[in-house]
Image (cartoon, rainbow, N blue to C red):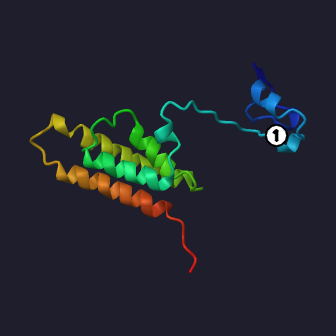
């Protein structure tokens, strides 16, 4: 059951009742306006940190993207980008990465085409994502 948004927050998504129950007694300004819930089906992938996600992407690259049709590459890429505020830029980089992984993983259907350019495209996409998500160090 969903509770309608208060009149001063029209246009916002309604707050689900379970969330309302857990926030009972909170002042209106502290209650969340927007809530996203996601079912964890693969916690080892969905909850991994940036460094581990990059390592897992590189492991998948070494396997030529085999068994990555589950969307694991995109999940890992979003984990790499979890702390980045520019979601549009990350979306574009992640799109490039997933296309490159898909092309690589489907390359066994065309054994007459060279695979190395496809591997390099994935490698470049991982490197670009890593560079874009690096936090500047203060020295």
Is residue 105 found left or right of 130 in the rendered image?
Answer: left
Spot occupied by residue 40 in the image (x, y as percentages of width and height): 54, 32
Asked whether residue 93 appears in the rendered view, the answer is no
Is 78 in front, or is 5? 78
Q: Residue furthest bottom?
A: 139
The residue at the point 82 percent across, 35 percent down is 23
User: Image quarter for residue 26?
Assistant: top right
Query: Residue 38 falls in which quadrant of the image?
Result: top right
Front residue (pair 81, 58) = 58
Residue situated furthest top in the rendering: 1
Q: Quadrant of the N terminus?
A: top right
Residue 17, image x, y percentages: 78, 25
Q: Residue at x 24, y 37 (%)?
A: 106
Viewed as shown, does residue 39 lie left or right of 111?
right
The spot of residue 120 in percent (x, y) is: 25, 56
Which residue appears farthest toward the left when viewing the image? 112
Horizontal and vertical percent position of residue 84: 56, 56
- Please name the residue that numbered disc 1 is placed on: 31
């Amino acid at each position: 059951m969903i509770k309608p948004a208060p009149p001063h927050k029209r246009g916002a998504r309604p707050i689900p009742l379970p969330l309302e129950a857990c926030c009972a007694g909170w002042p209106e300004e502290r209650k969340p306006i927007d809530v996203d819930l996601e079912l964890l089906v693969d916690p080892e992938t969905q909850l991994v940190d940036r460094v581990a996600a990059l390592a897992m992407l590189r492991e998948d690259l070494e396997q030529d993207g085999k068994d990555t049709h589950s969307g694991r590459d995109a999940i890992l890429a979003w984990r790499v980008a979890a702390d980045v505020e520019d979601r549009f830029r990350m979306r574009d980089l992640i799109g490039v990465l997933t296309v490159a992984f898909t092309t690589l993983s489907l390359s066994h259907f065309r054994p007459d085409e060279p695979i190395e350019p496809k591997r390099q495209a994935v490698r470049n996409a991982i490197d670009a994502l890593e560079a874009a998500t690096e936090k500047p160090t203060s020295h």
